């Protein structure tokens, strides 16, 4: 099953997408948030859809898509999880996952504009595979970790490199600006993805290919990441884990290349669709 949320910002409704199009499942009565996932919402929605799909209205083409999950309790990101990305940024291969947070206020729809922050000169892109947690996870064994995953989504982990690297403190400062976490277009449940360790992911800027990688090149694979994180914090249903980006970020070029107003960023992952953002200047 593929879950979508659609409608005006802050007024999103739940839906599903199939080969026949996008459908409104508001009559199911629940949004895709923590409560939905922790109460076996995917199972209940699947059963409800089987009985009610014939009466669900279609979502009109061109309708805005929101983040495919409602605001999670946290967005956890893994840094330098592809060897080629570590190399391009002159960083050592990490011995343990590099963990940082992204403020949930940065979450937006997959095709919303990305706003270049005030005083930013180094706004960068990062195509990433996002994991959505399906049930409460604490001290999970790696062998059991996949049981705690609800599904997967496409994420662009936008970063302001000056804020992140040159301003001291933690990376979260360069990761949490408004609009810096477009998520979607959909969340695909685990059964939709045949091999999570062999998915192509790519990103272009103004039509030029910048990133072209594959999840087969993960340094730390998803079961390990879920298990690892659960040793330090409780993962709650609906939480998002962004698993790192392959080579080709703006910081890695010589000289570096950063986004400017008017740039168009497109990205995609096998089985998880595509998204498109236009960079716009911050306005008071």
Image (tube, rainbow, N blue to C red):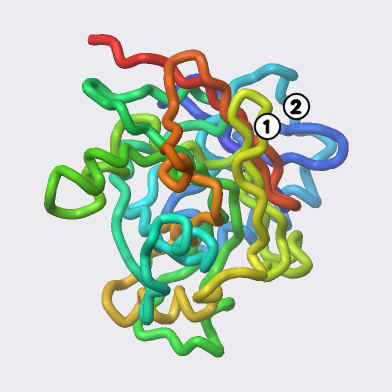
Residue 200 percent location from the top left of the image: 71, 55
Question: What residue sits 49% from the left and 61% below the top?
Answer: 243
Residue at image position (60%, 57%) is: 152
- Comparing 257 with 75, the one in front is 257
Q: In which quarter of the image is residue 77?
A: bottom left
Is residue 208 placed above or below 242 in the rendered structure?
Answer: above
| Mark linked to residue 57 | 2
Q: Distance between the residues labelled 2 and 1?
A: 6 Å
Q: Residue 188 at x, y = what percent?
A: 67, 53
* Residue in the image at 74% along x and 48% along y: 49
Kindly identify which numbered label has been placed on residue 24. 1
| Helix, strand or loop under label 2 | loop
Q: Describe residue 64's horizontal placement relative to residue 200 as left or right.
A: left
Considering the numbered disc 1 on the image, is that residue within a helix, a strand or a loop?
Answer: strand
Check whether the beta carbons of the residues at disc 2 and disc 1 lie within 8 A of each other.
yes
Which residue corresponds to the image point at 52% horizontal and 41% vertical from the top-left?
183
**Image quarter in which the C terminus is found:** top left
User: Quadrant of the rendered structure where residue 208 is?
Assistant: top right
Residue 53 x/y as whole percent: 80, 41
Q: Give the x, y percent position of residue 36.
A: 49, 54
The answer to whether residue 102 of the structure is visible from this angle is: yes
**226 and 68: which one is in front?**
226
- Please say if 269 is above or below 221: above
Q: Which mark is residue 70?
A: none
- Label 2 or label 1, whichever comes before in sequence order: 1
Mark 1 burial class by Cα count in 10 Å: few <14, some 14-19, many 20+: many
- Residue 86 appears left or right of 120: right
């Amino acid at each position: 099953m593929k879950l979508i949320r659609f409608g005006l910002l802050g007024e999103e409704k739940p839906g599903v997408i199939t080969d026949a199009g996008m459908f409104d499942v508001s009559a199911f009565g629940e949004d895709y948030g923590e409560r939905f996932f922790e109460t076996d919402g995917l199972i209940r929605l699947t059963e409800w859809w089987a009985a009610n799909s014939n009466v669900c209205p279609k979502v009109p083409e061109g309708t805005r898509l929101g983040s495919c999950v409602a605001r999670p309790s946290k967005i956890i990101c893994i840094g330098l999880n592809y060897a080629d990305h570590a190399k391009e940024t002159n960083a050592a291969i990490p011995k343990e996952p590099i963990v940082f947070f992204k403020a949930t206020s940065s979450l937006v729809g997959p095709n919303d504009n990305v706003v270049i922050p005030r005083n930013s000169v180094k706004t960068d892109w990062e195509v990433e595979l996002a994991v959505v947690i399906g049930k409460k996870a604490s001290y999970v064994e790696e062998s059991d970790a996949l049981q705690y995953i609800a599904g997967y989504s496409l994420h662009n982990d936008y970063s302001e490199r000056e804020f992140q690297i040159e301003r001291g403190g933690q990376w979260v400062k360069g990761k949490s600006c408004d609009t810096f976490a477009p998520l979607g277009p959909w969340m695909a449940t685990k059964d939709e993805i045949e091999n999570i360790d062999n998915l192509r992911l790519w990103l272009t800027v103004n039509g030029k290919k910048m990133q072209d990688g594959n999840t087969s090149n993960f340094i730390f694979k998803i079961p390990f990441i879920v298990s690892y994180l659960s040793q330090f914090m409780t993962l709650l249903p609906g939480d998002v884990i962004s698993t790192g980006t392959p080579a080709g970020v703006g910081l890695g070029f010589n000289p570096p290349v950063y986004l400017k107003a008017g740039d168009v960023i497109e990205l995609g992952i096998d089985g998880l669709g595509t998204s498109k953002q236009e960079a716009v200047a911050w306005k008071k």
